[in-house]
Amino acid sequence: TKPSYKWRRVLLKVSGEALAGDQAQNIDPKVTMSIAREVASVTRLGIEVAIVVGGGNIFRGSSWAGCSGLDRSSADYIGMLATVMNAIFLQATMESIGIPTRVQTAFRMSEVAEPYIRRRAIRHLEKGRVVIFAAGTGNPFFTTDTAAALRCAEINAEVVLKATNVDGVYDDDPRRNPKACLLDTLSYQDVTSRDLSVMDMTAITLCQENNIPVVVFNLSKPGNISKAIMGEQVGTLIGG
Ligand code: UDP
């Protein structure tokens, strides 16, 4: 019998902003726990889940570059370190409910987490472990969205599921235009030519070149993460 879910291996991108929830603190433990529970429910079905975490809730390189002489590269390294903090927090939460989880960092900090080793990451996934990729791509001037697209391509995951604080992609800014419509599907072309702020250009073109579909959805609605992972209609699907 054919399984009802669509994806076998997914790359879930969780932005730093989403981790913060509506808390004044950087991380909302209710959010990390709900992510852990929903991921647990799908890994039990045999779907392999890799996660890329952002760091914008703690530090965003581009907003600090230039302050007190901080150059962009140094600022971005701080940003990448911020993603490691989020990754360790999320790992702890996952393991507290019994999901075996490994963190792999794009640059070495081997006392804290494994270094990124592609084949090892794939092996973890095959064994049913969740792998959290931290420190983005390991390079300044990139984003964790680009890291998500890159890791997705590298580990042969089938889709990037981008969990955000919005329901999906709108045809206009819903904060300014109350009549803005949520779009069900979009082509890569639509995203790049209409400059819809879904992902940065580097990330979206990397997805396009590798035919990786992207689903943008709201993480704060209960059940959405598992729906997205199960391949149910949620948010906006970009592809084609
Ligand atoms: N960053 C980087 N290279 C990468 C990924 C991230 O330099 O490959 C830095 C960059 O400064 C960025 C910060 O890490 O602002 C946090 O990542 P991002 O802004 O993508 O997080 P999110 O918006 O998803 O919370």
Image: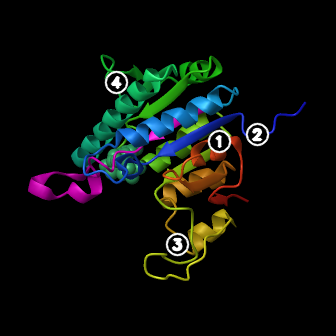
Q: Residue at x 56, y 37 (%)?
A: 38
* Circle 4 crowding by C-alpha within 10 Å: few under 14, some 14–19, many from 20: some
Q: Sequence order check: which comes first, mark 4 or mark 2? A: 2
Residue picked out by circle 4 = 108
Provide the secondary structure element on which disc 3 rests: loop
| Tag 3 and tag 2, C-beta contact below 8 Å | no
Check disc 2: other Cα within 10 Å, few if <14, some if 14-19, many if 20+: some
Label 1's element? Answer: helix
Q: Between residue 142 and residue 42, name the one nearer to us.
A: 42
Distance in Å between CA atoms under marks 2 and 1: 8 Å
* Circle 2 SS class: loop
Residue labelled with disc 2:
5
What residue does disc 1 label? 229
Residue nearer the viewer, 220 or 101: 220
In the rendering, which numbered label is found on residue 14? none
Residue at figure coordinates x 34%, y 43% from the top left = 28
Q: Nearer the viewer, residue 161 or 157?
A: 161
Is 236 drawn above or below residue 230 in the view shown? below
- Residue wearing tag 3: 195
Type of amino acid under label 3: Asp
Q: Is residue 59 magenta?
A: yes
Q: Are marks 3 and 4 in contact (CB under 8 Å)?
A: no
Asked if the residue under mark 2 is in contact with the one under mark 4, i.e. CB atoms within 8 Å, the reply is: no
Q: Earlier in the sequence, mark 3 or mark 4?
A: 4
Q: Amino acid at mark 4?
A: Arg
Q: Say what amino acid the circle numbered 1 marks.
A: Ile
Q: Determine whether label 2 and label 1 are within 8 Å by CB.
A: yes
Quarter containing the C terminus: bottom right
**Distance of mark 1 from mark 3, alpha carbons?**
26 Å
| Residue span colored magenta | 49-72
Q: Is residue 142 visible?
A: no
Disc with the residue nearer the chain's start (1 vs 3): 3
